[in-house]
Amino acid sequence: MPANHHKKNRPSKKHRHGTKPSAARRPQDLHSREIPAKTPVNREYRSSLFAWIFSDKEAALSLYNSMNGTSYDDPDALEFTTLENVVYMGMKNDVSFLVGCDMNLYEHQSTWNPNMPLRGLFYYADVYKGYIASRKLDIYSSTRLRIPAPKYVIFYNGTKEEPESMELRLSELYGAPSADGYALECTAQVLNINFGRNRALMEQCRELYEYAYFIDAIQRRLREGITREAAVDGAIEECIAGNILTEFLTRHRAEVTNVILEEYDEEQHMRTVYQEGRQEGLQEGKIEQLIRTICRLLQKGHTPAYIADLLDEEPRLVEQICSLAQAAAPEYDIKAIYHRLSY
């Protein structure tokens, strides 16, 4: 992409959506645009719904403009670099694209995970490999290459209370401080997109507002003690009536409902299967099953403390397995982890 792309794609000052929605407005005041059905929803309903919405170039450009104070109006200026069919730690690279000289990686998380910079490192390694290969660049050349600058943003809307914005750094995960600095760093900006947070961003990006509203509609009902099925059904009804993701939810109602319920039920199923095996004793095969279960939960972004509580296991054992598993990511060789384990 040419370096003067920013100048060529400056639109008029009028916002491309017209009047900007306010996070304080009632949902009836918003007019939902149809979300394209080109990307299937998978079991991670919040992450996949986020990726589905923002895999549309207009939505992605709206989010980029809202976050950067820019006003590009040409969606084709985006060059998507999303890693299709590549899974690292159980999570896809949600939305990655090029604008000008930036390599933007947008990911969503519904579970708090302080290890995101390490995941970002894995993501960017493959994204840059693809960038180099697609442009036939020579990394052994005597000429200095110019590559896009990375910008890694995590959109968080879990139940754990977190500030509106914060930074996570890869160097915070290193085992010992270094007076000379570190040879490798990766920084992730975390934005809290629970409904009512980061209002200025929500006012600028209608798609993000509607996504946050829908998730909040589900969570509100769950906090009231309503069953999962009723909470999802009620949230869909509320959003359809209020012009929140109306076309998307009307067209894919059954699929969205099923995926949400599967996501909620998966961890309970994992716990049941593990506990049944645990009753037979923790011989070698059962310890490997424990390691396998812990790896799957780590892939979903859960912390060692949460995993120990979920599986009713000794925290020190779980922490040791988690440490070994994270060091073995993303392959997670169960046999290798088992042989390195001392218990």
Image (tube, grey):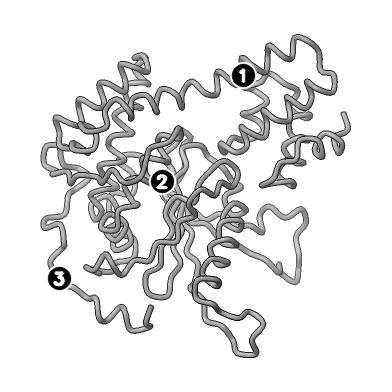
Mark closer to the chain start, 2 or 3: 3
Distance from disc 1 to disc 2, alpha carbons, whole Å, reads: 29 Å
Disc 1 versus disc 2: nearer the observer: 1
**Crowding near the residue tagged with mark 1, few <14, some 14–19, many ≥20 C-alpha atoms within 10 Å:** some
Q: Amino acid at mark 1?
A: Arg
Which residue is at 37% across, 18% downward? 228
Please tell me which residue is depicted at 47% across the width and 64% down the height of the picture: 151
Left or right, 285 with respect to 295, comes to: right
Question: SS class of the residue under badge 2?
Answer: strand
Percent coordinates x, y for residue 234 in the rendering: 25, 21
Frontmost residue, 216 versus 286: 286
Name the outermost residue toward the bottom: 142
Quadrant position of the C terminus in the picture: top right
**Front residue (pair 93, 169):** 93
Contact (Cβ within 8 Å) of mark 1 with mark 2:
no
Q: Earlier in the sequence, mark 3 or mark 1?
A: 3
Look at the picture and state if 336 lies above or below 95. above
Q: Nearer the viewer, residue 85 or 248?
A: 85
Residue 140 is left or right of residue 31, and the answer is right
Q: Which amino acid does the dot numbered 3 rest on? A: Lys
Of labels 1 and 2, earlier in sequence is 2
Looking at the rendered image, the disc whose residue lies closer to the viewer, 3 or 1, is 1
Tell me if residue 231 comes above or below residue 251 in the rendering: above
For residue 153, which quarter of the picture? bottom left
Per the rendering, the mark at residue 271 is 1
> Which amino acid type is shown beneath numbered disc 2?
Asn
The residue tagged 2 is 192
Q: Which residue is mark 3?
A: 13
